[in-house]
């Protein structure tokens, strides 16, 4: 359940970044930048967990988050066509 939440939340975050950036009307650039921002946020979130008491950073979570963002990326182009 916990791992599915990572994928789902970052999938949604990717789509929200895309929607915020897509005012340029260039879907490809907005989607790529949205993916980069989402993965960057995942990395910084794990770094932040290293400084939070009773939390530990885990690189596997970054990969799950990136997987969720990748699903969002694919869904955007599937529905934009």
Image (tube, rainbow, N blue to C red):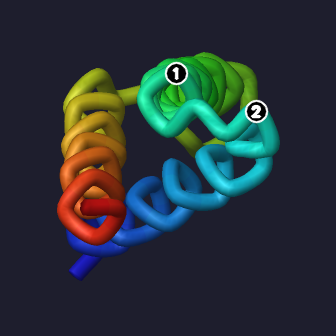
* Residue drawn 29% across the image and 22% down it: 59
Q: Name the image quarter holding residue 8.
A: bottom left
Q: Which residue is mark 1?
A: 29
**Helix, strand or loop at disc 2?**
helix
Q: Foreground: 47 or 9?
A: 9
Tally of numbered discs: 2
Q: Name the image quarter holding residue 41.
A: top right
Residue 57 versus residue 21 in the image, above or below: above
Badge 2: residue crowd in 10 Å (few <14, some 14–19, many ≥20): few
Q: Give the percent coordinates (x, y) of residue 28.
A: 43, 29
* Residue drawn 78% across the image and 49% down it: 20
Q: Is residue 64 left or right of residue 17?
A: left
Residue 59 versus residue 22 in the image, above or below: above
* Residue drawn 39% across the image and 59% down it: 11
Task: State the CA–CA distance, disc 1 to disc 2.
Answer: 9 Å
* Residue drawn 74% across the image and 38% down it: 21
Residue 56 seen in render: no
**Helix, strand or loop at disc 1?**
helix
Q: Is residue 76 left or right of residue 60?
A: right
Q: Foreground: 10 or 50?
A: 10
1 or 2: tag closer to the N-terminus: 2
Residue 51 seen in render: yes
- Residue 8's tag is none
Do residues under tags 1 and 2 come within 8 Å of each other at their CB atoms? yes
Quadrant that contains the C terminus: bottom left
Q: Give the percent coordinates (x, y) of residue 37.
A: 60, 25
Q: Give the percent coordinates (x, y) of residue 4.
A: 23, 72
Badge 1: residue crowd in 10 Å (few <14, some 14–19, many ≥20): some
Q: Give the percent coordinates (x, y) of residue 34.
A: 56, 33
Q: Which residue is mark 2?
A: 24
């Amino acid at each position: 359940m916990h791992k599915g939440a990572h994928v789902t939340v970052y999938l949604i975050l990717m789509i929200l970044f895309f929607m915020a950036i897509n005012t340029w009307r260039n879907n490809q650039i907005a989607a790529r930048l949205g993916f980069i921002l989402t993965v960057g946020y995942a990395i910084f979130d794990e770094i932040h967990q290293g400084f939070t008491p009773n939390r530990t950073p885990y690189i596997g979570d970054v990969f799950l988050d990136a997987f969720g963002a990748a699903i969002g990326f694919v869904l955007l182009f599937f529905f934009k066509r």
